Every structure is written in C-alpha cells, then in structure tokens.
Image: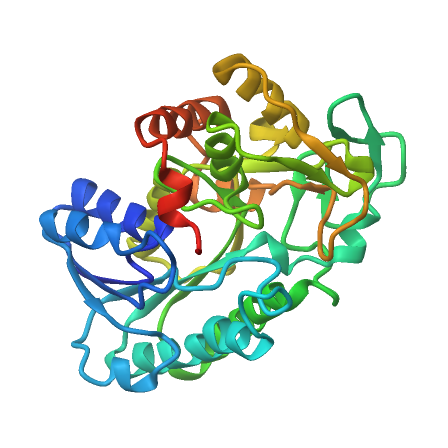
Amino acid sequence: MKLFVTGICGFVGSSLASWFREHRPSFKISGIDNFVRPGSEMNRSILRSRGIAVQHGDVRNASDFENLSAVDWVIDTAANPSVLAGVDSRTSSRQAIEHNLFGTVNLLEYCKRVDAGLILLSTSRVYSIPALAGLPLIKAKHAFEWDNTVTPVQGASANGLTTEFSTSAPVSLYGSTKLASEFLALEYKHSFSFPVWINRCGVIAGAGQFGTAEQGIFSYWINAYAQKHPLKYIGFDGSGRQVRDGLHPNDLAELIAQQIEYSQAPAVTTFNVGGGSGNTMSLAQLTSWCAERFGKHSVESEPTPRLFDVPWLVMDNGRTTAQFNWRPKRDLLSILDEIANHAQRNPNWLDLSSAP
C-alpha cells in the first residue's frame, strides 16, 4: 500500500504519517509540504528518520504533481486552517482560495490520473455561523451549555452537530473553500470512479502542535499560559464561555485506516469527526485547568465580538460510530496533559512556531 500525504510536515500531516509508519509498517509513506507554516521544517528530518519520504511541493502548483508517481491513497492535510484566512493581515483572500480550493482541484486531478483514493480532511467550520450563533444555549457560570428545554434544532443537539446541520453562508472564506472542496471531491468520485472519504474534523489537538490564537486553540492556550504570555477572552462578554471539543490525531488516524481498508461500497462518505460531547471545554475552564497545572496567570477580557467567532462547536460522531464502530479513545484531559508536558519540555515552542 502506497500512502501519500499533502501538508505532511504540518501537525496533522506529520502525526498521521507517523501513526501509519508505526501501525501499518508495510505501507510506503511519502508526502509533500511547502513549508510556509512556521515550525513545519522541524518535522522534515523527524519523518525522514522514520523512513517517510518528504519532498518540497505546493498543492497550489499543478506542475508539482506532474512527476509524482502513482499511489493507492492520498490524505489531504494541506490547508490554511485559520477561520480568519483571507481577511486578516497575514493572507489575502486570493491566497486563501488558492490554497484551500484550487489546491484541491490539483489534488483531485492527481488522484484521477493515478487512480488513487482520497481522504479529504474538511472542517467543522463548514457549518453556518448565523445558525451556530443561534443555537439554544444557556450562559452557565464558566461555559455555554445546551438548553434542552427548547424546540430541537435540525442537525444539532447536546451531543453536538451532525452533517445535517446548516451549511448556509456565511461560514468564512476558510469554511466555504473547504465546503466547495467537498462538493468537488464528490463530483470527481462520481465522474471518475475513485473512492473518496470526507472527514469534517473538530479541533485536533496534541503535543507538538503549532497552535495560534485562531486555530489549534488548546495547544496555543496551554503554551502561552505556561510562559505567562498575554491572553485574552474575545467576544461573548469577554467571559471565555465559548466551547470546543478536542480530538487527538491518533484517533483520527485509526478512523482513516478503517476508511482505507473499507471494502464495501458505502452509502455515506461524509462524516463528522471530533472529540464529541464528552471531550469539551470552554476557554474559562481551560484557564482553570492551566492555573492548577502552572499557577496563577491573569487573562484579559475583550467583550467586542470578533469576525466568525461562534459560542459552541461540538461534533456529533454518531454516524461515524454507526459506520465504523469508531469512537475517540483519548479523553480531553489526557490530551491537555500531553500538550502541557510538551510545553514544559519546550518553553520556546510558540517562538519557534509563530510568524515573526
């Protein structure tokens, strides 16, 4: 089995490649990365030492795929994963679209040429921001909680969001490019008859993640707190009540392995994949956890809302469990411990993995 990973030197790409090297040693694993993400260069030598072939390549360049040999499966982890991509000062809107959508086109053409299956990693941010903002939530002391006394919402419950939840605009440039990539992937699947699985991932978290304030929030918050860097609750009354679930990349890898080895013709190919309702935490709760681990550190408040922020985003894995008997094995507290241990061993991590 030949496995090819785009964005292989990013946190998710390198984690998946390493998991497959350990758990599927017969697989031949290779990948490309454009190394634009600060810190990604650090993973090149680590992956190569594990027998994983890494070369420079950019999914935005169709020519970078021309000389690639045939593989059996492609895992696409290359993206600009920030919900602020294209609207902040770091990237332009065209750059975000080129990376997250045009790159998918080049990748799909490669899959078509070599007849490879595709695992497309999408995102929970394909879901409608107004619909998420309108969820029936209770403002509890430290976190937003689901209000079970109101009329049920289609595609959402206390268990999280299902794939039936609204994807109506606006969803951000990041979300819309990933949603468009999903549609294109399904069209290529039906037009050119190669297998496609789409995994809409929640927040993926673990040691060695290049977290920022816009994404990779668990890793970013813990590393920043440990070094007593300035932190701020933004929006939602500046209270830190906003909630996310956390998923370890090894759990995602186990699901992908099942999808690669799935031998039947699936009726459904799009799944939500996250930590689920049992692995959720608000920023305020995460701060309390950090205080117990690292001691007191003040967090500022900025009540003014920020573009594209949502109060509660949790993935319902019910369909994924029904199809693959898959559930996350790593609980959120163990993931936080893993990140904190890494932060203590690498006190300059944010400096190494942040843009200058």
Q: Can you say whether 321 is above or below 171 in the image? A: above
Residue 76: x and y, percent?
Answer: 37, 63
- Is 214 left, or right, of 323 in this rendering? right
What residue is at 51 percent from the left and 76 percent from the top?
A: 95
Does residue 169 show up? yes
Does residue 193 show up? no
Residue 193: x and y, percent?
Answer: 37, 78
| Quadrant in which the N terminus appears | bottom left
Q: Can you say whether 200 is above or below 278 in the image? A: below
Residue 4: x and y, percent?
Answer: 24, 64
| Quadrant in which the C terminus appears | bottom left
Give the total number of marks visible in the rendering: 0
- Is 84 left, or right, of 182 in this rendering? right
- Is 294 left, or right, of 283 in this rendering? left
Give 350 or 195, whichever is nearer the viewer. 350
Q: Residue furthest right?
A: 150
Colouring mode (rainbow / by chain / secondary structure / one colour): rainbow
Give 297 or 263, whichever is nearer the viewer. 297
- Is 354 left, or right, of 261 in this rendering? right
